[in-house]
Amino acid sequence: MQVRIYKPSKTAMQSGQAKTKAWVLEPVSPSRKDAESLMGWVSSADTLSEIRLCFDTMDEAVAFAAAKGWQAVVQPAHTRAMIAKSYSDNFAFKKP
């Protein structure tokens, strides 16, 4: 079984960094997802697609996948570059 290990990115609905610190291990489902015709819900026959395991470090996630005999695909973490500036810079007059 193939699994994907990644660090989730920040959602657009929040300004903080909540739920972005842990590494997530998810199985890659080979079955396709079908939309139910009446309600439009998306479903799959594969129950492994519902599993998400969280780890503190990437090494823990890779070690867990190796212990289970799973093939792990690690996606590198995307970090945000923080530019340090003071609050008064918002009101400073800057010539072009």
Image: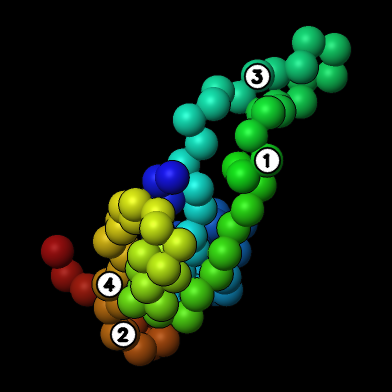
Q: Determine the secondary structure under disc 1.
A: helix
Q: For marks 4 and 2, give the one nearer the viewer.
A: 4
Q: Is residue 43 left or right of residue 30?
A: right
Label 1, label 2: how far apart the Cα atoms are:
48 Å
According to the picture, the residue beneath numbered tag 1 turns out to be 47
N-terminal label among 4 and 3: 3
Q: Indicate the quadrant where residue 81 lies.
A: bottom left
Quadrant of the frame with the N terminus = top left
**Which of the pair 95/16 is nearer the observer?**
16
Q: Mark 4 and mark 1 in contact (Cβ < 8 Å)? A: no
- Residue drawn 27% across and 61% down? 76
**Three-letter code for the amino acid on which mark 4 is drawn:** Ala
Asked whether residue 2 is in view, the answer is yes
- Residue 21 lies left or right of residue 77; in this view the side is right
Question: Along the polypeptide, which appears first: circle 1 or circle 4?
Answer: 1
Looking at the image, residue 9 sits to the left or right of residue 62; the answer is right
Residue 12 spot, x, y in % from top left: 54, 54
The amino acid type of the residue labelled 3 equals: Asp
